[in-house]
Image (cartoon, grey):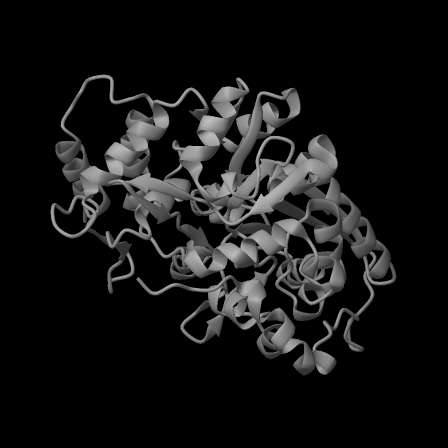
Amino acid sequence: MKKNGLYLISAISMLSLCSGCQKQETVPADTEPSESVISLTVWSGEEDEALLQEIFSSFKSHYADQASFQITFQPQSESGCKDALLADLENGADVFTFADDQLGALAAAGALDPLEDAENIRSSNLSASVEAASVGHTLYAYPLTADNGYFLYYNKAYFSEEDIQSLNRMTDVAAEYGKLVTMDWSSAWYVYSFFGNTGLTVGLNEDGLTNYCTWNSTEGPIRGVDVAQAMLDLAASPGFDSRTDTDFLSGVQDGSIIAGVSGVWNDVAIEAVWGEDTGAAKLPSYTCKDQPVQMASFSGCKLVGVNAYSPRKEWAAKLAEWISSESNQTLRFEQRGQGPSNIRAAGSPAVQESPAITALLAQSEFSQLQRIGGKFWDPVSAFALNMAEGNPSGASLQEQLDRLVEGVTAR
């Protein structure tokens, strides 16, 4: 499987090109001042509300001589944005943040129009993030982050550098302390980690809708049942538990969890608890068929979209551009620890020295750009949750994998 490096890798090499890349945030000279109140609704993750309210305030101040604004924030998960928007486009948010794998469907449904200022956006952002915001050569959304991946957080007070090379070793250490290492097996996004570097494949067919998948293969050095058994072995450890991302953070805060797989969105909150003991690294290996297998990951970025049906589309576009500007991507990194897609912001010393970003860079060698059809998620989650419970029915692993593949590849 071709591996795609994380988008931030190219930041340093591109800095020399960005002298003319600054975002233009001024109002065009021919823009007419208006007395009317511009009402805009913004959808984004609940955890971003405080940050976005600050960004809204600066937007209102910047354009105060042009109009008055009423900007309403409504929480909406980025992973579920597409479905919520397409359910009622005309009454959906004017501006919304979403994961890049939803772009094709949103563009095909007419929810997004091509961006007018495409060349400026291309020159200001990392090339791979621009690619993720495009269908073919047409740019449909504003790149916002280049860090939508995951890696290992660990508490240095419990683990050595040698310990964190192996997930099985880490679960043994956690068990010795009566603590836990966690990972979310209810999410197929994370479960990909176990299959990605085994020679077993999954991906999008040429039709752009359906998937291929060989996770049930009975041939090759590592078979599907070998991966399933490895997951069962991990689940049996008293030092491991499958926890959602929210429960992972709660466990960090109450002291029961000392390591887990997550992303940069939890960096600030974890560091607030562990302080100088906060560690971040690439994902470890796990033991499969008596050999170490480096865990893989999906990668991607977050985008800002403008609803093609917005009655205030021009102002919605200005707000989307403002949210994704260099200065506000820098603010996002400072407050939320999220890696910028903007070239200048991504190349700043503070970003380059971030342990979380460094961990993403290290994991990028083993990451794959997420391009998966919608039938992938539920079958994989159902399979992995049964593994997390220890396969209580004792059902055939091969039969479960066959059922998984049947669901993933369904047309």
Name which quarter of the figure residue 348 lies in.
bottom right
Instruction: Give the image location of residue 47, x and y in percent.
Output: 65, 37
Is 175 left, or right, of 24 in this rendering?
left
* Closer to the camera in the image, 25 or 272: 272
What x and y, as percent, mark residue 331? Answer: 76, 53
Place of residue 193 in the rendered image (x, y in percent of width and height, measured from the top left): 38, 45
Left or right: 9, with 233 as reference point: right
Left or right: 182 with respect to 401?
A: right
* Most foreground residue, 11 or 154: 154
Which residue does the image show at 60% across and 24% down from the upper left? Answer: 250
Residue 389 vertical placement versus 60 (above, below): above
Q: Position of residue 173 (x, y in %)?
A: 50, 27
Q: Can the viewer see residue 208?
A: yes
In which quadrant is the N terminus drawn?
Answer: bottom left
Of 182 and 43, nearer the camera is 182
Confirm whether residue 114 shows in the render. Answer: no
In this rendering, the answer to whether 254 lies above or below 125 is above
Q: Residue at x 58, y 64 (%)?
A: 8
Residue 225, above or below 220: above
Above/below status of 274 relative to 177: below
Picture mark count: 0
Q: Kindly indicate the quadrant of the structure image that contains residue 259.
A: top right
Residue located at (20% from left, 42% from top): 224
**Does residue 17 appear to the left or right of 179 in the view shown?**
right
